[in-house]
Image (tube, rainbow, N blue to C red):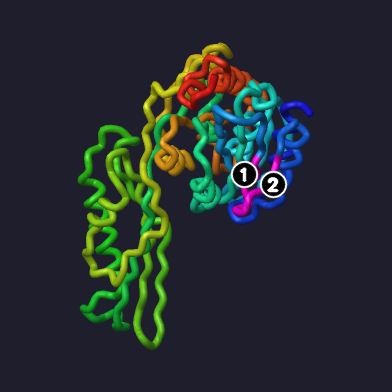
Amino acid sequence: MDDAEVLLRLVRPYSPFGREAGAVRAFVRVARSLGYAVRVDAAGNGIARRGKGRPSVLYLGHIDTVEGRLPVRRRGGRVHGRGTVDAKGPLAAALLAGCRAPQDGEFVVVAAVEEELDSRGARHLLGRTPPDAVIAGEPSGWDGVTVGYKGELQVEATFRGPRTHFASAEPTAADRAVAWIGAVRRLVDGQPAASPFRTLTSKVVRWDTESDAGGEVARVTVDFRLPPGRSSQALLGAIPRDGSPASITPRIRMEPLEVDASNPVVRALIRGIRGAGGRPTVWRKTGTSDLNLVVPAWGVPGAAYGPGDAKLDHTDRESIALADLRRSVDVLDVALGELLGPESTLRRSAGGA
């Protein structure tokens, strides 16, 4: 099975978050054919394993995508289809590189579920024995490494009030919601803006109103993106109460993350990129990833890496160049050799020979 066929077999099953089972089965079949021991855990994550013992390196990819079915095809040196970039291309690269990884330690590839929703698959993994290092499978470009992600706080504010005549001076529940959104924007606009990565931002992502014989209700969902140094708890306490919302309920909470750019995983990936003829770029992104969860919980070195142009993910133009997929396999081959090989700093810290 060549590189393109591995990717195509992962991409063909449509797998928006919450409906990943068919794609997980495809991942299991592909991984087994490449020589991995495979299983599906209680959360529905696909898990492929080669080798055993320590050090252990975990490649945490995700098999779910955003919604929106796209035709899957190979054309002009590219594979097109939903998930090619985010993030089945990175999963394919990890499976292919792992076939060549040293067998003295353990390499695990996880096809996690519901990363695009609430990271349910990654949260399930937090109770396992931590690996010695983690690579999150996200598109960084074959010659890039991601060392930072912003955090996320999504809240729903609910406003209630009696029904009023539109000609009266009494504000509606929707009026009070508008006033609250204005206060939120003033809070965000008053924050320092050193760079997009280090700036607090917000977007209104949902608005619903309804009325019945008992009164009016307006519900507004706002999504905040948090820079490093700003916790979701602190922001939750700072959210204004202008407009007197009846409740402000957190829906998503993810803390920001910025890893040490000189940690062993970053160094190994950079050496791999240089070995493949690239000039490494270190990224700090304004989105979130499962890396935000697992690195603080496990206390291990990590970074995000995978082929694909992140500007194409979540779009109808999602596709990946097969040349970039193959280069990323070479990069991971070098990086895994360094992380799992006899001279690995991970091996020394794990107490290996």
Seen at 46% across and 30% down, the residue is 303
Q: Secondary structure at mark 2?
A: helix
Q: Are marks 1 and 2 in contact (CB under 8 Å)?
A: yes
**Position of 42 relative to 47 (above/below):** below
Residue at image position (56%, 24%) is 142
Q: Please give the range of residues in magenta.
A: 38-47
Q: Which residue is identified by label 2?
A: 23
The location of residue 348, given as percent across then percent down, is: 48, 21
Per the image, label 1 sits on a secondary structure element best described as loop
Residue beneath the point at 63% across and 31% down: 52
Residue position marked by numbered label 1 in the rendering: 63
Q: Is residue 31 magenta?
A: no
Q: Is residue 267 above or below residue 38?
A: above
* Residue 340 figure quarter: top right
What percent of the width, then of the height, locates residue 313?
55, 39
| Residue 150 x/y as whole percent | 38, 40
45 in the magenta segment? yes
In the rendered structure, the answer to whether residue 61 lies left or right of residue 211 reads right
Residue closer to the observer: 52 or 329 = 52
Residue visible at 24% across and 46% down in the picture? 189
Q: Nearer the viewer, residue 229 or 74?
A: 229
Q: CA distance from mark 1 to mark 2?
A: 7 Å
Q: Amino acid at mark 1?
A: Ile
Quadrant where the C terminus sits is top right
Quadrant housing residue 1: top right
